[in-house]
Image (cartoon, helix red, strand yellow):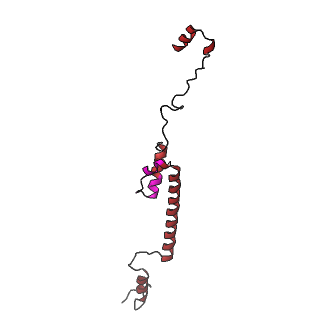
Amino acid sequence: MSDTDGNATVDGAQEQTAKENTPQGNEKTVPYARFQEALGQKKAAEAALEAVVAELTQDVPEAMRDLIPATLPAAEKAAWIRVAKAKSLFTPSVPANSPDAKRPGGKPTLALEDMTPMQKMQSGYAK
């Protein structure tokens, strides 16, 4: 006798159509239109990321743009630029002879016109 579980017809046509719908047994496939949509979204996201990296690169001084590695992918390049900015790689250092190199210590300037020579010498030797 044959199986009577209600899933197969006499000639096995129902089993055959089920196997034809899934190409390699249990493997699932994605419709082509959905794949194209996902691919389009991925390309749009990559283009947006490239635009963000271009903006970050524009913020770097022109003399230092060649320090940015060109071989990195966009996401890693953005991370590299942010880390370099956090470590002040792109900010120019203050030269030793600039006005900012030695800031005033809060001492008031002395009026030398009203001082005697002895007072002038004493002011030169700080305690």
Is residue 70 found inside the magenta-colored segment of the image? yes
Is residue 10 found inside the magenta-colored segment of the image? no
Which corner quadrant of the image does residue 76 belong to? bottom left
Total labels drawn? 0
Q: Which of 56 and 29 is in front in this view?
A: 56
Answer above or below: position of 103 versus 85: above
Q: Position of residue 49 (x, y in %)?
A: 51, 59
- Residue farthest right in this picture: 114
- Residue 46: in sight, yes or no? yes
User: For the point 44% across and 82% down, which residue is it?
Assistant: 21
Q: Which of 8 and 73 is in front in this view?
A: 73
Where does the magenta region start and end? 63-78
| Secondary structure mostly seen in the magenta stretch | helix
Q: Position of residue 124 (x, y in %)?
A: 52, 14
- Residue farthest left in this picture: 1
- Residue farthest bottom in this picture: 11
Q: Where is residue 24 in the image (x, y as percent from the top left)?
A: 38, 78
User: For the point 55% across and 13% down, which residue is it?
Assistant: 123
Q: Quadrant of the N terminus?
A: bottom left
Q: Nearer the viewer, residue 53 or 58?
A: 58
Q: Where is residue 126 in the image (x, y as percent from the top left)?
A: 52, 14
Answer above or below: position of 59 versus 49: above
Which corner quadrant of the image does residue 27 belong to? bottom left
- Residue 126: in sight, yes or no? no
Answer above or below: position of 86 versus 18: above
User: For the point 57% across and 9% down, which residue is it?
Assistant: 117
Which corner quadrant of the image does residue 71 belong to? bottom left
